[in-house]
Amino acid sequence: MPFAGGAPSAVLMRTAVGAYLGWLFAASVLAGCVAPAPLAPYKVVGDTVPEVLVATPGDPSRGRAISAGRDANCLLCHSVPESDQPFMGDIGPPLAGVGLRLSAAQLRLRIVDAAVLNPDTAMPPYYRVSGLRNVAAQYAGKPILTAQQVEDVVAYLQTLR
């Protein structure tokens, strides 16, 4: 049903996005896309996670594939400049130039747990596993992305200059 009088309200959009992201997470869990534990420890310092999560450097080409793939599906909410994907979201900010605006440590925090910066964010925590609600017992403690996948996505986002 179209929205009378223009764009939907922010509350309606957050509710719709939250419901869709919940569905997306559940679907990825059922499809076996959820990464196995154990988690690499991380520490939030200001608006960053300054330490890399794994010793192996992130790979931008893998990060690009992850961001467009089913595990992360960044394109659900964000647009990227060089994507060959026909449909991209506009709920989150465009990712063009994000590698100039944010450091690797700032990007890492936004992927690990964007709610640290904005508790009302629609962006799911891709690496945080504590404090989540409605998680089936067999998936408790398992992040959406592995530590290596987080670093790969960070490496890719840094190329978007």
Image (cartoon, grey):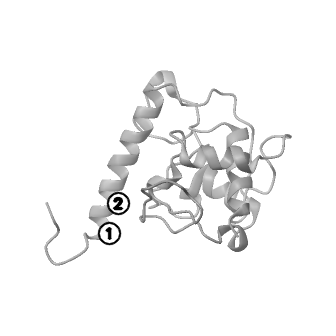
Q: Quadrant of the C terminus?
A: bottom right
Residue at x-position 60% and y-position 30%: 35
- How many C-alpha atoms fall within 10 Å of the one at disc 1: few (<14), some, or many (≥20)? few
Q: Quadrant of the N terminus?
A: bottom left
Q: Which disc is residue 10 wearing?
A: 1
Which structural element holds mark 1?
Answer: helix
Which structural element holds mark 2?
Answer: helix
- Can I make out residue 150 in this image? no
Residue at x-position 25% and y-position 73%: 7
Q: Is residue 107 above or below residue 65?
A: below
CB within 8 Å, label 2 to label 1: yes
| Residue type of the residue flagged with mark 1 | Ala
- How many C-alpha atoms fall within 10 Å of the one at disc 2: few (<14), some, or many (≥20)? some
Q: Nearer the viewer, residue 31 or 126?
A: 31
Does residue 4 appear to the left or right of 50 in the view shown? Answer: left
Q: Which disc is residue 14 wearing?
A: 2
Q: Residue furthest top?
A: 138
